[in-house]
Amino acid sequence: MIIVLAILALAALLAGATVSESQLAAGMAHTANDQERAAWLAESAVNRTQWLLLQDITAYPDRTLDQPTTPTGLDSRERFRADGVAHRFPRADGDCTVTITDMASGWDLNLAAAGTAGLQTLGDLFSREPARREAFTDLLDKIQDYSDTDDLVRRHGLEREDYARAGQAPLPRNAQPQFREELLWIPGAADFFPADPGSGRLPELRLVPPPGLARPAPSLRPSFFTATERLLRARLGLDETAAKTVLDARRRWQEEAIPLESSLDASLRSRLRQEFLFRESGYYTVTATATAGEGRPGRTLVASFRADRTMASPFLRYHEWQWQ
Ligand SMILES: [Ca+2]
């Protein structure tokens, strides 16, 4: 009797396990299916946005970004510009939101042109934190050693032997970084340049294009529409409250088409225009986030490229093609 009951209990357990396993497999298949669909939607939205952008450039050759756009009168076309405004591409089988921003964003990491001079302004933010300021200055030595061609160690720098001891051979590159995120290989860099948790990208630094592709001129001011709170504070000497006011004004520009004139005083607007770019550089970053339906898993695709209406070579070669 006991044996029979034990066998029955075991059979029930096995059946339960089989059912939950098949439910798990079905759930995983659903998730994989949703993610696959979201990926197709995101890729398709990036492609579509490239052509809509090109159409916009052709229809409106003046690429200054002085005012938000609202479809008015006879011209009811939705504008596609590097202003960070969200565009929705709803579909029966999912949903995708796309933003276009300028690739000329953030601090420039073109060390060949200006060494670490471009990064110095970030150090100014730590003027009231001597230890952090010192750590940042030390990091600048490490960044220079990493990219200069010699093996001479700066005061707080690191060269080949130091990296080898830390198990990071064959670093340093001893040449210009070939991609932006390799900065994170330098000890201490992640403390000052936090990576985006979803993608691992370093959005506060300007993208380093693959070899052979042109880049926005290092002298080009960073785009206003991607400026982070830190970049606003560093370039304008603002405190946190003033930087938040600027970010709020930008959000109203992007979401409600309210001009900056309505949110910020004239002197601050004039300083913003001196320090930030209010026109397109011709290099774009398109971010497309798609889901197969509300509350379902999604994918994000970030693609950067140069585009102009001449469609001159190398038209649409990607500086970045990054999945999240
Ligand atoms: Ca070196």
Image: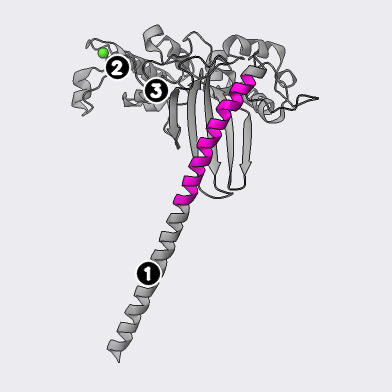
Q: Quadrant of the N terminus?
A: bottom left
Q: Position of residue 267 (x, y in %)?
A: 68, 11
Cα separation, mark 2 vs mark 3, equals 13 Å
In the visual, does 265 lie left or right of 207?
right
Q: Is residue 124 above or below residue 201?
A: above
In the image shown, does 129 or 163 lie closer to the viewer?
A: 163
Residue beneath disc 3: 180
* Residue 18: assigned label: 1
* Residue 53: assigned label: none
Residue 230 in sight in this render: yes
Q: Position of residue 211 (x, y in %)?
A: 36, 17
Residue at point 41%, 33% (across, down): 200
Cα separation, mark 1 vs mark 3, equals 48 Å
Q: Nearer the viewer, mark 2 or mark 3?
A: 3
Q: Earlier in the sequence, mark 1 or mark 3?
A: 1
Name the amino acid, label 1. Thr
Name the amino acid, label 3. Arg
- From which residue to which does the magenta span run? 32-57
In what element is the residue under mark 2? Answer: helix
In what element is the residue under mark 3? Answer: helix
Instruction: Check the image and name the residue furthest to the bottom.
Output: 1
Which quadrant holds residue 232? top right
In the image shown, does 283 or 7 lie closer to the viewer?
A: 283
Ligand 1 is within 8 Å of the C-beta of the residue at disc 2: yes
Which quadrant holds residue 241? top right
The answer to if 5 sits in the magenta stretch is: no
Residue beneath disc 2: 146
Principal secondary structure, stretch drawn in magenta:
helix
